Amino acid sequence: MPPSFKGRQYELRAMGLRDFAGLRRDDDPLDPFALADFAKLLVVDFGQIQGLSEEAREHLLGDGANMWSGGTCSRPLPNGWRVVILNPKHGRQRNNATLMEEVCHVFLGHKASRLSIIAQNSRGKTIARDYNEADEEAAYAVGAAALVPFAALRRLARAGKTSIEIARHFNVSRELVEYRLKVSRLWSDYRALHPEEDAPRLARRNGFTGGEVRRTGGG
């Protein structure tokens, strides 16, 4: 289990979700899309959204694509389900983390009363509803722990696997794996095993790669 009290609490809730999903091994990949049905979340393709102006659609998929990851409509459908929209520009790995966070909001009993842009939280993520910060932190942390369990993460890291290899195994982003390494206090050991990653990591953080400037998104 993670060394911190809060980390252990998140891990226990994550283990419950994995057990509910029928996973028996700590290194089995979790599919958030399978859990979405149990949470009564209907994932709708962005292209099916009606009522958006062409200008808004172009912005959300263009210059503004890195400003949002997804969200759940606070008003339920007549059958009680809620609609979830995921950013199609982020790819399956990042969408897995976004959807898992939405699933966790449901399983943890969090309530959002309306859609609203609030600003950015401590992770630099734009909040698009009025969950409080504690709920946002818990949903993200539990979701990340469910996707990348502590025991499997520690075992794979100690075996010399890179964050990219671990991310590929669990079908999540490298950024999510590195977040888990940090909050689980495995980061210093991981960096000691992979000193060759320090320079490229710094370059990514500064927005440079191969001499070109690029915009980087979160995990």
Image (spheres, rainbow, N blue to C red):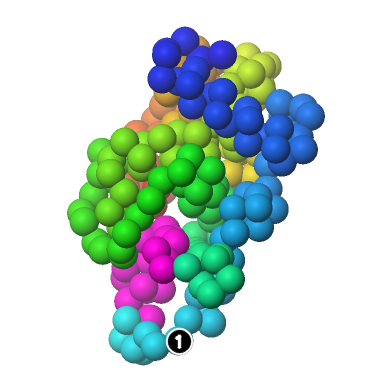
| Residue under the image location 44 percent in, 40 percent down | 139
Question: Which residue ends up furthest to the left in the rendered image?
Answer: 119
Give whichever of 50, 120 is nearer the camera.
50
Is 52 inside the magenta-drawn segment?
no
| Residue under the image location 51 percent in, 72 percent down | 77
**Image coords of residue 52 (percent x, y):** 37, 85
**Image coords of residue 85 (percent x, y):** 48, 67
The amino acid on which the numbered mark 1 sits, given as a three-letter code, is Gln
Query: Looking at the image, is 17 positioned above or below residue 129?
Result: above
Judged left or right of residue 81, residue 7 is: left
How many tags in the picture?
A: 1
Q: Quadrant of the C terminus?
A: top left
Magenta stretch in the rendered image: 57-75
Give whichever of 86, 208 is nearer the camera.
86
Q: Dot 1 corresponds to which residue?
A: 50
**Image coords of residue 70 (percent x, y):** 43, 61
**Image coords of residue 185 (percent x, y):** 44, 15
| Residue under the image location 50 percent in, 34 percent down | 142
Viewer can see residue 33: no
Judged left or right of residue 157, residue 27 is: right
| Residue under the image location 41 percent in, 68 percent down | 75
Q: Residues within 10 Å of mark 1 (few under 14, many from 20)?
A: few
Give whichever of 187, 121 is nearer the camera.
121
